[in-house]
Image: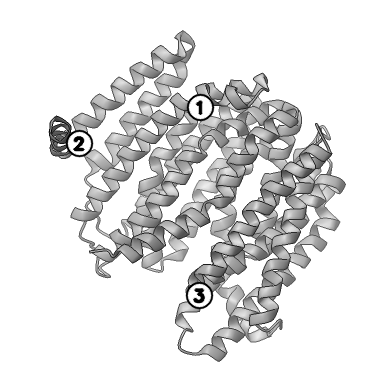
Amino acid sequence: MISKKTIYGSFIYTLVGSLPFASALVLLPFYSNFLSTTDFGALTVYISFSLLVQILATFSIEQYIATHVHQLRDDASERRQKMGSALTLCFLFGLLVIGLFSLIGPSVFRLFDKDSQLDFWTFGMMSVVTGMFNGYFRNYTTLLIYDRQEKEYIAANLINFFATIGLSIFFLYRFESSLMGPMLGRLTSGIVIFFVALVHHLRNYPFRFQMPNAKEILWFAAPMLLISLFNWSIAYIDRFFLTSQISMDQIGVYDFATKFLLPVELMHMGLSNFLMPKIYSSWDKNFTNPPMVGANQMLHSFSILTVLAIIGTIFIIPIAVPLIVKNEDLYLAFSLLPLLSISFLTRSAYNLLSGVLMLQKATTRIVFAFVITGVTQFGASYFLIPSFGLEAAMYIAVATKVLLVLVLYFVASQSTTIDLRMRKFFWYPLSIGTGLFVFYQIQHMGFWAVWAAFVLFAGAITWVFFGKELRPLLAFYLGSKAR
């Protein structure tokens, strides 16, 4: 039985860890009301670029920290030296990346920004520096998590949350209707959290470069870097292909639609942090033929809750957003939600399969899955987006998530036998995804009528697949109401 302390700790870390997503939600109405649709689209590209820089600047060293801080717990001196080396290496990599993009940044922008819609030396360079600051902070908070410094972790993330929101809103008002506002807000909040992390580093760990430690860290982190880069590609590369093909205001609408699905993302984070450790512990280190009775029940709950979250999001967003967002051009994003929601139906499968491979330490197989998926996505984007624009980007984004799960299943099945109950694990999300696709195609006939029809369809499909499990729950609930 999982303890209340574990549940509480899981909830706290999930809540605090989701604050960056929460800050994005809080700032969304301010960005959409202060910025033009074109500037909103440009901001999307700069933020995506900054996230790429963050990955490069950290070199996925946080994965080394997460793994080794426990292994070195009994040797405080060596642990202090190696964690100090990891943070120092991250700092040096950040400086190296800033120097590198100072030389090649304009050329990189010209590869995808053929119409010169973006400005590297102002906003692009601000994105580079912000990415470096955020990456260093990410390594610092990863160390706090796995070193069980709960109070420091909460404090650091609260500082990040309030600095990001406060400074962004301040500069939005200071530079009204200008992209400079949100970009300065992100940069200055990055400076704040960078110094928070740096002070902790200097107080608790040596600021020293040691070649033996550096080689060990980089050798471990390199495969993780590839995974992070392909993960970024799957999530953001389409923005850069779209930049040379469509207007910035269309990119703004597309990104606005993806932001509407952040509540589903937050729910997935919470469920994953709570359910996946329970699933792994139920296997009792049997990662080749794990017992799946309890695991399947939890994964099925994950799938049903995902469908409910999608239905609720599609219902609430068109009603709530116009109350706080006055830029009517962005309302076009409502029609994109059914299609973009399909990718969330793959999340429980992704969590399970990637988790199995990580527990088996089969990193190369995970890299293989991401390489296959990333290369396929890149090729499809290169050939299809120039002809079909945003429509192609959305279909490719959904297909990429499905392909990743299929490849992960293939590589995991080479070393693991998992009873996935394919009828519920595969056919249920496929049926719901088909319904969402039809919803997307015929919504012009009347959004709310089609939404209602989809709700009835989703309810019927869920009952067909899970009626046996839901019937006792429904009977108990109705019986409680009657009493």
Which residue: 63% across, 27% down? 253
Q: Position of residue 283 (x, y in %)?
A: 25, 64
Type of amino acid under label 3? Asp
Query: Would you identify the image quadrant in which residue 97 lies?
Result: bottom right
Q: For the residues carrying marks 3 and 2, which lies nearer the camera in this image?
A: 3
Quick check: 71 left or right of 239? left
Type of amino acid under label 2? Phe
Query: Would you identify the image quadrant in which residue 229 lies?
Result: bottom right
Type of amino acid under label 1? Ile
Task: Return the mark for residue 147.
Answer: 3
Q: Position of residue 190 (x, y in %)?
A: 72, 57
Q: Looking at the image, is 413 positioned above or below residue 165?
A: below
Label 3 neighbour load within 10 Å: few <14, some 14-19, many 20+ = some
Which residue: 37% across, 50% down? 271
Which residue: 81% across, 45% down? 123
Q: Quadrant of the C terminus?
A: top left
Task: Return the mark for residue 247.
Answer: none
- Earlier along the polypeptide chain: callout 3 or callout 2? 3
SS assignment at label 1: helix
Q: Which residue is mark 1?
A: 317
Q: CA distance from mark 3 to mark 2?
A: 41 Å
Q: Is residue 108 visible?
A: no
Q: CA distance from mark 1 to mark 3?
A: 39 Å
